[in-house]
RNA sequence: CGGGGCGUGGCUCAGCCUGGUAGAGCGCCACGUUCGGGACGUGGAGGUCGGAGGUUCGAAUCCUCUCGCCCCGACCA
């Protein structure tokens, strides 16, 4: 008889999300610090797994890690017009320190383009200094009106890359390389979360960017979530911070910069992509614990035998599998099954007295919850079987999420169809409208153009709003 | 920041309307029996009722202010 500690998705999707965050022990709302959360051990472990995978990819593509100050002189933020306008409402300022009013306030970084721009202008002299390819792992703060654990918090953790290049083409290539080789690859291969690689409209682009690219994912309520962004900043910040270099012809030029980021929001994306009414579902490649072993026994004799078998079975796992043996003896096996299911551990192994006799174990897969996901297999060859199963789960989760997205994406050819489709997912439409048209649609429907997919069919059609002929298709959706 | 809801043992909540000094379930602790899908019995611990001020002989309850959370909007990774 399951206790309904998790609200079902059908009943209240938002509450379901909050229940998972709580029950899987990922985070806790820090009610004493507005809009902030405590990343609890399990949640932080998932972030560490993400960091490792992303960091590897960032370094493989030629970047190095650095760290810039948390505090940025307020005047820096003011230097790039669009940037100020975009971030001013959400920056927190430090006006006093050391018991005195500061001559110039600092802002707590909402993002680091400006302070990095200042230093880049000092560091870059020649085309030989380019490209400059840096990334930093840090926290940032954006004062938000409404927050939700992971998806939108005042303080969040992220990676922000900042690069400088000699030409627009180099900057553009960098922007796209990050989008494809780092972000989309990570999302799909590691998070098992299918994403649409796209270009942001003028309306949705980063304040101060020439162009913003993004990966957009679909959550299980059909809403879109921007999972990562990569910006070609053009020469905007180079002009604002006077970042120049001397080229081969001894001509002084402004550099072309990029910036890109992914944040702890990805944890929210992960939850809303795979989890079910039983709790969290973690893809094996990100699960801090991939396998949990639950020993079953009635008395000390059985206990001894079972634990001996468990020891034998797990002997070779260290370094191969991330696993945990749940030997708490004050809880029943049934309780443990449910608890680990709720916490999203991909594979559970049960070892009882019967298994000791028969040389078997029970193996349960989290992507198929409850008894249906459980079967009995021989102890022999178990490690290989688990490794194969983890891979199967990883692939299965991606396939399931992709199918879901496809089933909730539809081509729409009229405004009425668009309005109907955004109630259930993504609406793909031909688009030739203006920024004003887009804003009007947002006012009327609460949906926005999530992106202009980089994979375009190239066929011609009629714009869903203006009726003009165009070959450009866009994705409309309600977004997080 | 607007509109609505809510803050009472760790959690979920009752009590508030009609003021009289705090309850339930779950969890927790001890012991015993249990243990292959959320076990049970017995005993026990635990709350200045979000905070401040006010009204009153007396406030969880009434009034004012304040802080925080949740939901719906506007703004956003």
Image (spheres, rainbow, N blue to C red):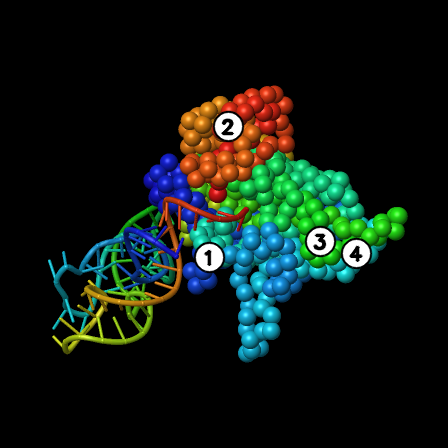
Marks 3 and 2, how far apart in space?
37 Å
User: Can you identify the residue that label 4 sits on?
Assistant: A124
Which of pointers 2 and 1 lies earlier in the amino acid sequence?
A: 1
Marks 2 and 1, how far apart in space?
40 Å
Disc sitting over residue A466 in the figure: 2
Label 1 marks which chain's residue? A
10 Å crowding of disc 2: few (<14), some (14-19), many (20+): some
Q: Which x, y percent locates residue A370?
A: 43, 35
Q: Do the residues bearing badges 3 and 4 touch, measured as CB atoms within 8 Å?
A: no
User: Marks 1 and 4: which is nearer the front?
Assistant: 4
Classify residue B37 as left or right of residue A132: left
Label 4 marks which chain's residue? A
Marks 1 and 4, how far apart in space?
38 Å
Name the quadrant containing residue A444: top left
User: Can you identify the residue that label 1 sits on?
Assistant: A35
Classify residue A17 as left or right of residue B8: right
Give a yes or no on whether discs 3 and 1 share a subunit: yes
10 Å crowding of disc 1: few (<14), some (14-19), many (20+): many
Please determine whether, in this image, residue A105 is positioned above or below residue A115: below
Which of pointers 3 and 2 lies earlier in the amino acid sequence?
A: 3
Q: Which x, y percent locates residue A124?
A: 79, 56
Q: Residue at x 63, y 29 (%)?
A: A455
User: Marks 3 and 1: which is nearer the front?
Assistant: 3
Whether residue A198 is visible, yes or no, is: yes
Secondary element type, mark 3: helix
Q: Which x, y percent locates residue A470?
A: 58, 25
Whether residue A367 is visible, yes or no, is: no
Secondary element type, mark 2: loop
User: Can you identify the residue that label 3 sits on?
Assistant: A239
């Amino acid at each position: 008889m399951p206790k309904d500690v998790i609200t079902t998705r059908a009943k209240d999707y938002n509450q379901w999300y909050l229940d998972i965050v709580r029950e899987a022990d990922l985070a806790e709302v820090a009610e004493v610090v507005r809009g902030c959360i405590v990343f609890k051990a399990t949640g932080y472990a998932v972030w560490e797994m993400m960091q490792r995978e992303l960091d590897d990819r960032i370094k493989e593509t030629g970047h190095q890690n650095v760290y810039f100050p948390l505090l940025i002189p307020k005047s820096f933020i003011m230097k790039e017009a669009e940037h100020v306008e975009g971030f001013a409402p959400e920056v927190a300022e430090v006006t006093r320190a050391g018991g005195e009013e500061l001559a110039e306030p600092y802002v707590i970084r909402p993002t680091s383009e400006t302070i990095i721009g200042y230093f880049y202008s000092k560091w870059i002299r020649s085309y030989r200094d380019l490209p400059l390819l840096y990334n930093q792992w840090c926290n940032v703060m954006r004062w938000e009106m409404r927050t939700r654990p992971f998806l939108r918090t005042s303080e969040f953790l992220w990676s922000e890359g900042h690069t400088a290049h000699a030409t627009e083409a180099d900057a553009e290539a960098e922007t796209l390389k990050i989008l494809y080789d780092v972000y989309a690859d990570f999302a799909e291969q590691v998070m098992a979360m299918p994403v649409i690689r796209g270009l942001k409209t003028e309306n949705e682009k980063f304040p101060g960017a020439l162009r913003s690219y993004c990966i957009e994912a679909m959550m299980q309520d059909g809403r879109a979530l921007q999972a990562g962004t990569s910006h070609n900043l053009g020469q905007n910040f180079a002009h604002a911070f006077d970042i120049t270099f001397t080229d081969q012809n001894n001509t002084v030029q402004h550099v072309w910069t990029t910036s890109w980021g992914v944040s702890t929001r990805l944890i929210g994306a992960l939850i809303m992509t795979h989890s079910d009414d039983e709790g969290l579902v973690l893809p094996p490649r990100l699960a801090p614990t991939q396998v949990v072993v639950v020993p079953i026994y009635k008395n000390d004799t059985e206990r001894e035998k079972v634990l001996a078998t468990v020891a034998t079975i797990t002997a070779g796992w260290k370094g191969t599998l991330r696993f945990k043996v749940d030997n708490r003896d004050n809880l029943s096996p049934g309780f443990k099954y449910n608890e680990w299911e709720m916490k999203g551990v991909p594979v559970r192994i049960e070892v009882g007295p019967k298994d000791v006799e028969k040389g078997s174990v029970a193996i349960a897969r989290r992507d198929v919850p409850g008894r249906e996901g459980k079967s009995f297999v021989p102890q022999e060859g178990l490690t290989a079987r688990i490794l194969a199963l983890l891979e199967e789960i990883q692939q299965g989760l991606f396939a399931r999420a992709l199918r879901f997205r496809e089933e909730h994406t539809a081509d729409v050819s009229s405004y009425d169809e668009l309005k109907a489709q955004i109630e259930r997912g993504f609406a793909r439409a031909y688009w030739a409208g203006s920024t004003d048209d887009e804003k009007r649609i947002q006012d009327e429907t609460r949906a926005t153009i999530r992106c202009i997919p980089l994979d375009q069919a190239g066929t011609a059609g009629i714009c869903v709003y203006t009726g003009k002929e165009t070959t450009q298709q866009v994705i409309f959706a309600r977004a997080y």
